[in-house]
């Protein structure tokens, strides 16, 4: 079955500042999103990319093919999960309900190809999963005044990255259920958890940062150069 990757890129990216959404800010001479798409399209198991853009996006390059893989686009929604749902809906018919689909943030250009491979190998044996990394810092819960109220145990706590990989139909159903319940899910795995699944956590490199702030651009530039594979 062909493995497609949905790439949500419909965010306004306001946290970083700048004159355009962050996916179009320049990183090592090219728009951030181009690095991400290039890396995904180079993965041998990925058959096509479904890029989710905001309505009226005038900055999209119009790219329709990359490394011989089709690149399609569709229009996203107000929240990340709306955008992912739109992307899943727009996948070609050759992707069956029971086929797996990947979801990868446009804002994570430094993902390693070998981590994607490990996710695909391990999570397809389970009911899906995601890249992540065990928490290394001590985790505090703050009160409203910004004072540390308690320390959460660090054991068994993970940070969640993308790609995340689930069966197309199951993920769509889970995201629709979250929308009906008015729960804002911050990733696909959370939607799956809410309907009773336990996505497999696959440890990946911490290089896989979500570029969010201006400082992240400098870090990503450095990481891109050393994570080329
Ligand atoms: O804003 P944040 O960094 O969490 O966004 C993660 C990814 O989701 C980004 O690639 C962003 O463009 C995308 N997104 C989206 N639709 C939204 C909000 C975010 O596709 N409504």
Image (spheres, rainbow, N blue to C red):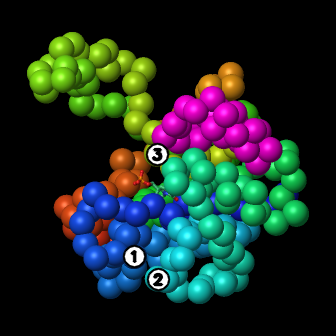
Q: What range is drawn magenta here?
A: 167-192
Q: Residue at x 18, y 23 (%)?
A: 144
Q: Nearer the viewer, residue 24 or 156?
A: 24
Q: Residue at x 69, y 25 (%)?
A: 195
Residue that carries the numbered disc 1 in the rendered image: 24
Magenta residue check for 34: no
Image position of 139 (left or right of 39):
left
Residue that carries the numbered disc 3 in the rendered image: 161
Measure the C-alpha gap from mark 1 to mark 3. 21 Å
Q: Residue at x 29, y 16 (%)?
A: 152
Magenta residue check for 169: yes
Q: Are marks 2 and 3 in contact (CB under 8 Å)?
A: no
Q: Position of residue 107 (x, y in %)?
A: 42, 61
Which of pointers 1 and 2 lies earlier in the amino acid sequence?
1
Q: Are marks 1 and 2 in contact (CB under 8 Å)?
A: yes
Query: Relative to residue 2, is residue 67 depicted above or below?
Result: below
Image position of 199 (left or right of 144):
right
Q: Main secondary structure of the magenta part?
A: helix
Residue that carries the numbered disc 2 in the rendered image: 59
Which of pointers 2 and 3 lies earlier in the amino acid sequence?
2
Query: Which quarter of the figure has residue 214?
Result: bottom left
Q: Residues within 10 Å of mark 3 (few under 14, many from 20)?
A: many
Q: Give the label, 2 or 3, closer to the camera.
A: 2
């Amino acid at each position: 079955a062909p493995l497609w990757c949905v790439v949500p890129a419909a965010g306004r990216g306001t946290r970083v500042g700048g004159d355009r959404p962050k996916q179009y800010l320049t990183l090592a001479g090219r728009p951030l999103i181009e690095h991400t798409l290039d890396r995904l399209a180079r993965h041998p198991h990925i058959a096509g990319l479904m890029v989710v853009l905001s309505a009226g996006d005038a900055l999209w390059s119009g790219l329709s093919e990359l490394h011989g893989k089709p690149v399609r686009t569709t229009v996203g929604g107000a929240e990340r999960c709306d955008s992912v749902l739109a992307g899943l809906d727009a996948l070609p018919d050759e992707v069956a309900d029971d086929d797996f689909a990947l979801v990868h943030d446009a804002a994570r250009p430094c993902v390693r190809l070998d981590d994607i491979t490990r996710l695909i190998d391990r999570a397809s044996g389970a009911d899906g999963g995601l890249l992540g990394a065990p928490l290394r810092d001590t985790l505090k819960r703050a009160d409203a005044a910004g004072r540390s109220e308690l320390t959460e145990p660090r054991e068994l706590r993970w940070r969640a990255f993308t790609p995340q990989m689930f069966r197309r139909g199951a993920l769509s159903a889970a995201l629709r259920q979250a929308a009906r319940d008015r729960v804002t899910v911050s990733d696909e795995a959370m939607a799956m958890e809410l309907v009773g699944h336990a996505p497999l956590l696959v440890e990946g490199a911490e290089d896989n940062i979500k570029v969010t702030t201006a400082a992240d651009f400098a870090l990503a530039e450095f990481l891109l150069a050393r994570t080329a594979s």
